[in-house]
Image (cartoon, rainbow, N blue to C red):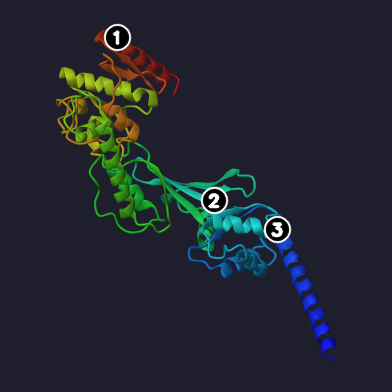
Amino acid sequence: MWKSVAANGMSFLIIVLIALAGAIAWGQREFRAEGPLAEAAFFEVPRGATLRRVSEQLEGAGVISSALLFRLGADYADMSGQLRFGNYEIPAGASMEDVLAIVTTGGPSTFRYTATYVLRLDGSGELRLRERVPGSGEIVALADFAYEDGLPEVYSSLIADGSPIAYRVSVPEGLTSWQIVEGLRAADFLSGEIAEVPPEGALAPDTFEVRRGQDRQGIVDNMVAAQDAILAAAWENRQDGLPLASAEEALILASIIEKETSVADERRLVSSVFINRLNRGMRLQTDPTVIYGITEGRGVLGRGIRASELRAETPWNTYVIDGLPPTPIANPGRAAIEAAVNPDDTSLIFFVADGTGGHAFAETLDEHNRNVARWRQIEAERAASGQ
């Protein structure tokens, strides 16, 4: 009888082992098989989320067929504790094995929605909302708006739904510190107060990622630290023999270069003009310093400069003061700072607009006067044609 019981028990054990092996094989096939997702989709792994929570959300979103099998597969692969928070694009038909690799590898987050806040000269900003189409990578413009015009419905709906949005702040080169601070204060997705407007020139223009609710003062502090580092590196690598007594003077010159030209290939030429003038004891005679003396960096002038303003005595007006003004007149970017301390080697001492967005440069007053005459003719032709 005991032999019969033992034989039956052995048979049962064999059946169980066969069934278990079959279940494991089935589970492996299911884990590696094409998933149920018909179209690519975005999925967020929240910070601090557990594997159980993520697996249930994946199943609920139709990304995987079984939360339990997903967890078992993660345990078997010893990856259950390797979740990386972020936003990920899941391809159509991704297997559970593929999905597990995506949410544990932790590559760059891919948000479906991005909102880039571009600061403007008037101290406000424009928010540009974009959508990345799942599966294609195509970027679609959803809305461009200023806060004073009200929030468009598409943006309000995303906020109400709690949809993940990647925020960026874009600070163009040449804005003043007041313009930057006012623009940051107007951004409703940021929080906190800015204690005071930083000194002119102290902020590094750039485009950077921020979190919704991020502290404004922290953003300003990071920009100050970045500008300090950029200026220190540029000053360390400056040309010999420059008529600049300090890194601060280099920053002042860089701010003038930034306001004079937006053409990358001209920056070192413009720098050479000012360096040559400083070396010869000539006044810089640059219009942006006149404008700064009128506005002191608060907003835009919004009109042409009057002849009386060219003669007006302000601390910044380089038509009436010798040398550099006492402070920067804007926040220059890295390229302008590097141009200030590494000018081209020229004999140029004049430049004027050439009608193409760039400038015509000259070594002599006669040549400069001819360039000015051509520019005046271009202005007259544009006025006659209503441009």
Query: What is the three-letter code of the residue carrying label 3?
Result: Arg
**Cα gap from disc 1 to disc 3, whole angstroms:** 75 Å
What is the secondary structure assignment of the residue under circle 3? helix
The answer to whether residue 141 is above or below residue 57 is above
Instruction: Measure how far apart labels 2 and 1 are at the Cα level.
Output: 55 Å
Give the residue type that dot 1 points to. Glu
Residue at left offset 32%, top offset 41%? 204
The residue located at (28%, 11%) in the rendering is 369
Q: Between 80 and 242, which is closer to the camera in this rendering?
A: 80
- Report the number of numbered marks: 3
| Circle on res. 110 | 2
Residue 202: x %, y % from top left: 26, 42
Q: Considering only order in the chain, which callout, 1 or 2, is on the residue closer to the N terminus?
A: 2
Marks 1 & 3, CB-CB < 8 Å contact: no
Quarter of the image holding residue 328? top left
Residue furthest to the bottom in view is 1
In this rendering, position of residue 350 left or right of residue 97: left
Residue on which disc 1 sits: 367
Residue 294 at x, y percent in the picture? 22, 35
Q: Quadrant of residue 248?
A: top left
Give the amino acid at mark 2. Thr
Q: Residue furthest top?
A: 366
Image quadrant in which the N terminus is located: bottom right
Under circle 1, the secondary element is helix
- Disc 3 designates what residue? 32
Q: Is residue 286 visible?
A: yes
